[in-house]
Image (spheres, rainbow, N blue to C red):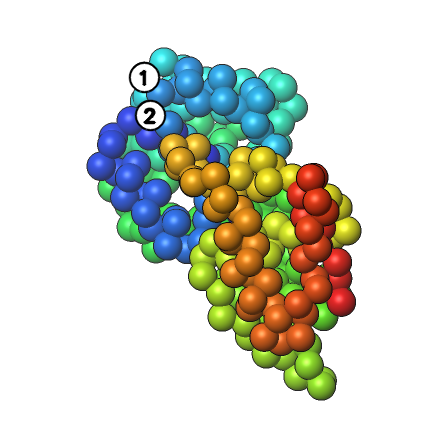
Amino acid sequence: MRILIVEDETDLGKAVERVLQQESYLVDLFENGTQAWEHLENKLNRYTVAIFDWLIPGISGLELVKRLRSNNHTLPVLMLTAKDAMSDRVMGLDAGADDYLIKPFGMGELLARIRALQRRSPQFKAHNLRVGNLTVDYRTNSILVARDGKQKQISLTAKEFQFLEYFMRHPEQIISSDCLLTQLWELEAEPISNVVAAQVRLVRKKLASIGYEKSIETVHGIGYRFNPQ
């Protein structure tokens, strides 16, 4: 799950980013509304939820919401702001925001509101995603495998989980390394050239430990394909 944050309070933005990354979300953080909109116009479908501060440099968070809705985009939006008057909340919701959180706020409440917004996302597929005998459980951020009528949990790092979940969302499709880099690393990240191949090797090793060593196929010169078992 990928989340866009537009917040010009640097410390707060970084704190929210860290908390979300600890929960295995991918996060893109902007401090300027104009830059965020330029990015959104091309990359909107990458996101599950957006978090906009109201008062930010360039295009305001309120205007970002209005632009999304005027273009018929249904991306769920949470507004973060110190503007706590009832009239402000009504204005934000009427502009198209899905939820409203007043600063200061607790990170636990923020995470709960994000989970609620995920359920409204066009990309949301319920609590579980099952492909073959493998199941993604979004409530625990874990992968389960069915063996002999029982389910066993696979221990994965956050990045391994993101990789395998992405492959399972695109079964039997050829996915290029460039696509994986774009989808599974934050914008400011500068991954080394062989990081995708290295990550695939790690995921394959985990799958091999449960007898699924052939699940991720290398399509030479093109990319990778996940073959359900």
Which type of secondary structure does the marked residue at label 2 adopt? loop
The numbered disc on residue 31 is 2
Query: Quick one: 165 or 207, which is closer to the camera?
Result: 207
List the residue tagged with mark 1: 57
Task: Tell me the CA gap for discs 2 and 1.
Answer: 7 Å
Give the residue type that dot 1 points to.
Answer: Pro
- Relative image position of residue 25 (x, y in whole percent): 46, 49
Res 101 quadrant in image: top left
Query: Quick one: 57 or 116, which is closer to the camera?
Result: 57
Q: Residue at x 49, y 65 (%)?
A: 156
Q: Residue at x 37, y 27 (%)?
A: 30
Give the residue type that dot 2 points to.
Answer: Glu
**One can see residue 2 in this view:** no
Q: Nearer the viewer, mark 2 or mark 1?
A: 2
- Relative image position of residue 64 (x, y in whole percent): 47, 21
Q: Quadrant of the C terminus?
A: bottom right
Res 8 quadrant in image: top left
Q: Residue at x 62, y 71 (%)?
A: 208
Along the horizontal axis of the image, is 89 left or right of 140?
left
Tag 2 and tag 1, C-beta contact below 8 Å = yes
Along the horizontal axis of the image, is 114 left or right of 222?
left
- Relative image position of residue 127 (x, y in whole percent): 61, 60
Query: Quick one: 17 or 181, which is closer to the camera?
Result: 181
Q: Residue at x 69, y 39 (%)?
A: 221
Along the horizontal axis of the image, is 1 left or right of 213?
left
